[in-house]
Structure formats: C-alpha cells, structure tokens
C-alpha cells in the first residue's frame, strides 16, 4: 500500500499489474535501505515540537503529539471486546432511557475461547 501511494497509485492492484515481480523485489530491497512513507510522521514531529515550544501550559496542560498534526491519523483501535462492551452498554442505556422503571443491566464480558477472532475458523 505504501509503495502504491508513494508512486501515485490509489489502487494497489493497478500497481501490481503495472510492474514485474523483479521490479517489486527491487522496490522492497530499496525500502529496506531507504524507508519511505514516513513523511507525515516527520512533519508531525517537527510541528509538535514547534507547537509545544509556543504552547501556553495554562490553556493546554497536555503537550501536543506528532499524531495531532497528521491528516487522517486514527488512534489504534482498543481491545475489540472492550469496544463491544462499551457499545452494548451505550445501547442498553438508550433502550432504557425512555422507561425509568427498567433498571439498566451491567454488560458482562463474554469469555472468548479464541483470542484472535477469525483465526482457526472454517
């Protein structure tokens, strides 16, 4: 994906159809020597440093992070089971909001026999 974006392709399959296996191997070797695709992280680090030097600690106690300046950056997802429990609790609260007589049940975590969903199935 990174190579496709670096070369201006929005479709990875289009890139793979346009280059040979030898060329792909050469690009992989080049990446090992000269990694590319981290330009936004470098920009974020410099920008965060400048922002933190000029930050008013009274107005913003937490320092800026490089990821604050990376367009489209999304934090890594939480544990899927924790997210599922939060979603369940949220919808239970919504379902019981109209009826104050109904107690809000506390969601219980379900045991997961397989720690990585999707693996080993089928």
Image: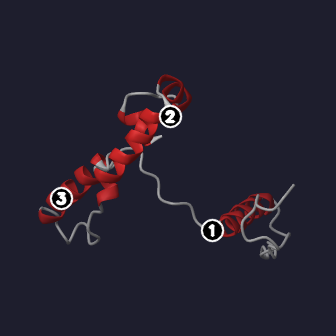
Q: Residue 107 location in percent, x, y? A: 78, 73
Q: Is residue 75 above or below residue 60?
A: above
Labels 3 & 1 near each other (Cβ < 8 A): no
Q: Is residue 14 above or below residue 91?
A: above
Disc 2 to disc 1, C-alpha distance: 37 Å
Q: Which residue is mark 1?
A: 79
Q: Which residue is mark 3?
A: 51
Q: Alpha-carbon neighbours of circle 2 within 10 Å: few (<14), some, or many (≥20)?
A: few
Q: Quadrant of the C terminus?
A: bottom right
At numbered mark 3, what does the secondary structure look like: helix, strand or loop?
Answer: helix
Q: Alpha-carbon neighbours of circle 1 within 10 Å: few (<14), some, or many (≥20)?
A: few
Q: Residue 29 location in percent, x, y? A: 37, 47
Earlier sequence position, callout 2 versus callout 3: 2
At numbered mark 2, what does the secondary structure look like: helix, strand or loop?
Answer: helix
Between marks 2 and 3 in the image, the one whose residue lies nearer the viewer: 2
Earlier sequence position, callout 2 versus callout 1: 2
Q: Which residue is mark 2?
A: 21
Q: Using the rendered view, name the quadrant where residue 117 is placed.
A: bottom right
Q: Residue at x 48, y 23 (%)?
A: 18
Q: Using the rendered view, name the quadrant where residue 82 is placed.
A: bottom right
Of residues 120 and 80, which is closer to you in this image?
120
**Numbered tag placed on residue 64 in the rendering:** none
Q: Residue at x 28, y 49 (%)?
A: 34
Disc 3 to disc 1, C-alpha distance: 31 Å
At numbered mark 1, what does the secondary structure look like: helix, strand or loop?
Answer: loop
């Amino acid at each position: 994906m990174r190579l496709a974006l670096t070369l201006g392709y929005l479709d990875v399959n289009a890139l793979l159809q346009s280059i040979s296996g030898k060329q792909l191997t050469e690009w992989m070797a080049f990446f090992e020597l000269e990694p590319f695709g981290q330009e936004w992280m470098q920009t974020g680090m410099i920008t965060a440093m400048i922002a933190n030097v000029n930050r008013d600690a009274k107005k913003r106690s937490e320092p800026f992070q490089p990821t604050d300046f990376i367009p489209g950056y999304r934090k890594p997802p939480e544990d899927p089971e924790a997210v599922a429990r939060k979603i369940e609790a949220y919808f239970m609260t919504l379902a019981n909001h109209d009826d104050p007589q109904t107690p809000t049940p506390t969601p219980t975590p379900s045991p997961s026999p397989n720690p990585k969903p999707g693996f080993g199935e089928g």
